[in-house]
Structure formats: C-alpha cells, structure tokens
Amino acid sequence: MKKRTGDDWFPFWIDKWLFGSTRDELTIEQCAVWVDFLALSNKDEGYIRANVGMPYPITRLAGLLNRPEELIQKTIDRCLDPKVNKLRLEPDGTLYMLSHDEYELSERHKRRLDDKVEPSLLKEKDIKKLILDNLNEKNLSYETEKICESGRIDIFIPGNPNQIIEIKSDNSADSIRAGMRQLLDYGIAFPGSILFIVFPGNISTRLKTKLKNHRIKIWKFPTKGHDDRQKDTKRRREKSRIDKNREDKEILNLLSKVKNYPLNKEKDLEFIKELKVEFPDVAILEKVKQICANWLDRPLLKKSRPRVQIRRWVSNEQKWQQEGDKERKVGRLYAKEPQFLSMELLNNVYRIIDGKGGDKGKFYIKAKLAFPKIKTKWQQSDKKPETFIRLVESVQ
C-alpha cells in the first residue's frame, strides 16, 4: 500500500468556511461530509483514494467516515457538478479535491514558520529531504529506497560498517515499535550495520530505553536552524582566522621597514604567535606600532636584540594593565565603604594635602583608622577641613 505522506493537520481558514460558497451549495449533511473529504484528501496530497490508481468503493468510504452510503454518493455527485466544481473525477476513478491547494499554508506563512515549525508538522518526504541535504553537505554517498529481502530501506549508507536509516512520519509508540521491528529485520539482512531511526518530536524514556537495548540509535534531526548556526560558527571562525592572518602580515610589514631589523618571516610569525599566547590581554599590533615609532628616534644597531626589546615592551604592558586593574579594584572598594566625611569636604581636605605635597592615599587610610577616636571632637568642632587634618595628625 502507498505510504501516506500527508499532513497531520491542515489550516481550516475561518473566513473561507463562514463566508464562502460551500454553505450555500451543499446541505448541512453534505457540509459535514465535505469536511471529512477535506481531512481525508490531506492524508494523500489532495486525493481521495485507497491507493494510486485505485478508488475507494462507496461501501468502504461510507464505513471509513461512518456516514450512510446514500449521503456519501449524493455529496460526491453534488461536488462533481460543474456548477459546484469541488471534486474532479480522475480517469482511474479516484477523486481529487480541487480546493486542496487553498487549504494549504501560503508560501508567506511557510517562511514565517520555517524556523519555528515543530518537527511533528513535517511530512515524511520533508524529513527525508533534510537528512539527504545533511548527507550531501558531508559528501556521503547513499542509496534511497534500497530493496532487500526484508523490505525497502529508506536510506542506506554503504561503508564499513553500513548505516541504515528508517524514517517515521510520527512519534507515536506504535510507529516507533514498527520502525524498530523493521530495522531489526534490516540488521539481519546486513549484519554489523549501524541502525538509525528518525522521527519528529520526542519520545518517552521507555521507548528510548527499548531502542538502546536493541542497539538502535536516534538520528539527530537536522533542522534548518541548527545548520544555520553551524554555518554562522564556521563563518565567525573563518573571519577570525583571516583577521589574525591580516594582523600578522601587518606586523611583519612594519618590522620589514625598520632599519637593521633581522626579518625572518617564519621565525617572526612563530614569535608573534608565542606573544599572543603568553600575553593574551595585550594588543600586539598596537604595541609593535609604538615600538617601531620608538626605533625611528632610537635606531637599532647591528648588535641590538629587537625581539628581546619587543618582548620586554609587551611584558611591561601586561604588568601595567594588571597594576591598573588592582588600582581600579581598590578604588571600587573605597567607593563601596561608607564615607566618614561628605565628598565635598573630603575633596577640600585632599586639596590641602596636595598643596603640602602629601600623599592622599596614606592620609585617607590614617584618617579612616583615626576617625573613631576623633569622632566626638570632630562633631563638636567648626567642621573645617583644616580642623579635620589637625585632629587626624594629632592621633598617634
């Protein structure tokens, strides 16, 4: 029997149903059968048939839809009427739903849902296409619909070992169990093969355990979003590599213009890489520019060791950065501590300390330690900065 490749659902547009001509063209009973026809046709891409070239007998169709045979026949006749024109009778006797395309998502809606659509809404052929696209990107050879004694294999990847992929259009327990049995049969026909099953959505832990016990792997569903993320990552890495190469070439170009610099491309490239690994926080290119500018005023001599000088400059730059980080951390700690003076008064105190050539940092620490002892006197004083300095210095 032909495999069903239809949707699990179809868009039932509200306006088309409420304000369209169907409600006027068909009776209430025929409208109900018409909706059944819509659902049934979407199981087979618009066709109402038992198989390719084989129409449903009225008796069987009535039993399938649980409707009287007479009602089914009258609905078909009415829909085949040129004035209504909702069904088309094919030469082989099968029926085709003329409005099938109207009850599908438009291209605009498909694009909107392209990255958001749940795998369970994909047809089996769409799942297969995604897998084949994934295999083509990896340059893997494969066979589709490979016939063997146990049946027809969805995707067969020859190799050592072979890989067999069984595709299921839904993730129901019955569907997964059927796929499991089919794969085990294929495993007998091709001993030692790696068996894969692919399905939309997720399955229960119990089914996953069964698959694992039978050594059947779940194929990682290759979604478009995942492929795009991989491509974006590749692009970023490639761009980073190109930028690094461009930076290295610029450094070599700068060094080649320095008089008496013993340029050796291989040796200097390795030297640059070592600097970037050892001093990751330093912008090597900017530092080399500074060094080259310095060498214009103080040219290299033949006995000079320029690479040692570059290393020293870069090493010092990292030390200065680390010291700057420490000072910023200390500053943040001071900022978090409660002030014993207002910022305005403290700034006036600092101006007086600067005028005397004193150290503001040392005074701050001394004032902080002395304040509990002078707090009472300070509160009773005239609150002038000179008074505060005198009180702090009076504490031994």
Image (cartoon, grey):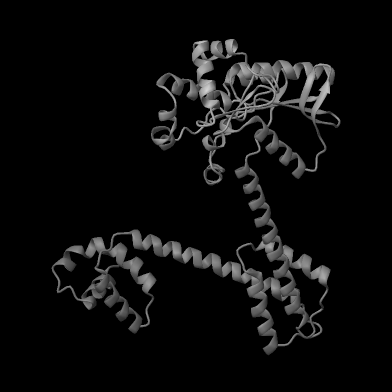
Looking at the picture, tell me which residue is in the foreground, 78 or 261. 78
Residue 261 is left or right of residue 229, and the answer is: right
- Residue 140 to residue 243: above or below: above
Looking at the picture, tell me which residue is in the foreground, 177 or 354. 177
Q: Return the x and y of residue 232 as percentages of the image width and height.
A: 64, 52
| Quadrant where the image shows the N terminus | top right
Q: Return the x and y of residue 182 as percentages of the image width and height.
A: 73, 17
Residue 345 is left or right of residue 108, and the answer is: left
Confirm whether residue 38 shows in the render.
no
Looking at the picture, tell me which residue is in the foreground, 359 or 170. 170
Residue 160 is left or right of residue 255, and the answer is: right
Residue 52, located in which quarter of the rendered image?
top right
Residue 383, located in which quarter of the rendered image?
bottom left
Total number of numbered discs in the rendering: 0
Residue 69 is left or right of residue 193, and the answer is: left
| Quadrant where the image shows the C terminus | bottom left
Confirm whether residue 336 shows in the render.
yes
Rendered residue at 71%/61% (across/down): 241
Q: Return the x and y of residue 374 as percentages of the image width and height.
A: 22, 65
Rendered residue at 27%/77% (across/down): 348
Q: Return the x and y of residue 360 as percentages of the image width and height.
A: 36, 74
Residue 365, located in which quarter of the rendered image?
bottom left
Q: Residue furthest right?
A: 160
